[in-house]
Image (spheres, rainbow, N blue to C red):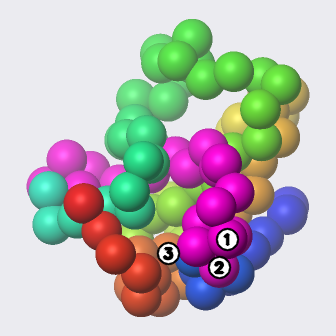
Amino acid sequence: MKKIYAKQLEEKLKAGEQLNILDVREDEEVATGKIPGAKHIPLGQIPERLNELVKDKPYYIVCRSGGRSGQACAFLSAKGYDVTNVEGGMLAWEGETE
């Protein structure tokens, strides 16, 4: 499984890279703030919402600490998606949130 640290992801965003970030936390967690521009699909809803994701785009998957995003990466990777797990998740995120 590919992985990236939260700080590296933040540096890519600061450099102006257009990234597809998928936040798989629950609604109440996202209410406290998410990475600007991140798409929110709770982990349990991913199977029925696959139509919202594009297979030819790479995705960076984030959760609170990296566990659920790892599960999402395993599932999406098996379905043919290009995914990278954000190590440390939002606990390690120091950048701005929306």
Residue indicated by mark 2: 11
Q: Which residues are magenta?
A: 11-30
Q: Nearer the viewer, mark 1 or mark 3?
A: 1
Q: Position of residue 29 (x, y in %)?
A: 21, 61
Q: Nearer the viewer, mark 3 or mark 2?
A: 2
Separation of residues labelled 1 and 3 (CA atoms): 20 Å
Q: Residues within 10 Å of mark 2 (few under 14, many from 20)?
A: few
Q: Residues within 10 Å of mark 3 (few under 14, many from 20)?
A: many
Q: Amino acid at mark 1?
A: Ala
Q: Amino acid at mark 2?
A: Glu
Name the side, left or right, on which 31 lies relative to 94: left
Q: Residues within 10 Å of mark 1 (few under 14, many from 20)?
A: few
Pointers 2 and 1 in contact (CB under 8 A)?
yes
**Pick the front one: 12 or 83:** 12
Residue 89 disc label: 3
Residue indicated by mark 1: 15
In the image, residue 84 sits, relative to residue 32, either above or below, namely above
Q: Position of residue 33 (x, y in %)?
A: 23, 64
- The residue positioned 78% from the left and 70% from the top of the image is 3
In the image, residue 30 sits, relative to residue 87, either above or below, namely above
Q: Secondary structure at mark 1?
A: loop
Q: Amino acid at mark 3?
A: Gly
Name the side, left or right, on which 77 lies relative to 39: right
Q: Secondary structure at mark 2?
A: helix
Q: Nearer the viewer, mark 2 or mark 1?
A: 1
